[in-house]
Amino acid sequence: MDLFDVATALPRGSRLVRQRSVSVTVDLPLYAVWYVLTDLAQYPDWEPRIVAISGLVKSRGRVTVLFADGRWSLFRVAQVERLTGFRLRGAGIRRELAARPLSDSRVEVTVTDVTWSHRPTLAEAAWPADELLEALARAADRVP
């Protein structure tokens, strides 16, 4: 899945400051990875930087995240491609979570952040992409 086209990822009149992607490979079928990525209620169980999260991963949905440091952020779900990923848009950032099957039981998960702020955004500071993927890999071990 390639949701990100940098030319369309930024709000009108903004300039790209940073684009960063990190990936992890997990030994799970695609449907199990999709389940972990979209079961928001379970994020606090496997992602220590998140205290609470609510919302639905659906096009034009909203996701509210309360981080462990007490800050919260609202994201809009900009795009969903069933089983392969979704894009969130928050203050100064667009975050894509994408899953690419490598085999029937192995999936590469990539988080791409595109920012248009010179300072680190709340999502980057409180919910770093690389730590999200490490936590995802741990959570994947618990999927039945």
Image (tube, rainbow, N blue to C red):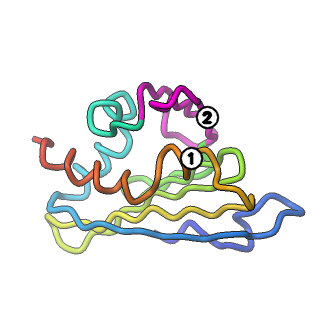
Measured along the vertical axis of the image, is residue 112 above or below residue 89?
A: below
Q: Quadrant of the N terminus?
A: bottom left
Q: Residues within 10 Å of mark 1 (few under 14, many from 20)?
A: many
The residue drawn where x is 61% and y is 34% is: 73
Mark number displayed over residue 44: none
**Residue at 16% over, 58% down:** 28
Task: Tell whether label 1 touches label 2 (CB within 8 Å).
Answer: yes
Within the magenta stretch, is there residue 54? yes
Question: At 74% from the left edge and 58% from the top edge, which residue is drawn?
Answer: 117
Q: Quadrant of the C terminus?
A: top left
7 displayed left or right of 93: right
Give the percent coordinates (x, y) of residue 2.
51, 71
What is the span of residues highlighted in magenta in the rendered image?
50-76
Q: Residue furthest left?
A: 144
* Secondary structure category for the residue under label 1: helix
In the image, what residue occupies the spot 24% across and 67% down?
A: 25
**Kind of residue sitting beneath label 2:** Ser
Residue 73: give its label.
2
Residue under pointer 1: 123
Identify the residue at the far right of this view.
13
Neighbor class of circle 2 (other Cα within 10 Å; few <14, some 14-19, many 20+) is some
- Distance CA(mark 2)–CA(mark 1): 8 Å
Q: Position of residue 38 (x, y in %)?
A: 38, 41
Q: Is residue 111 magenta?
A: no
Q: Position of residue 109 (x, y in %)?
A: 34, 63
Callout 1 amino acid: Ala
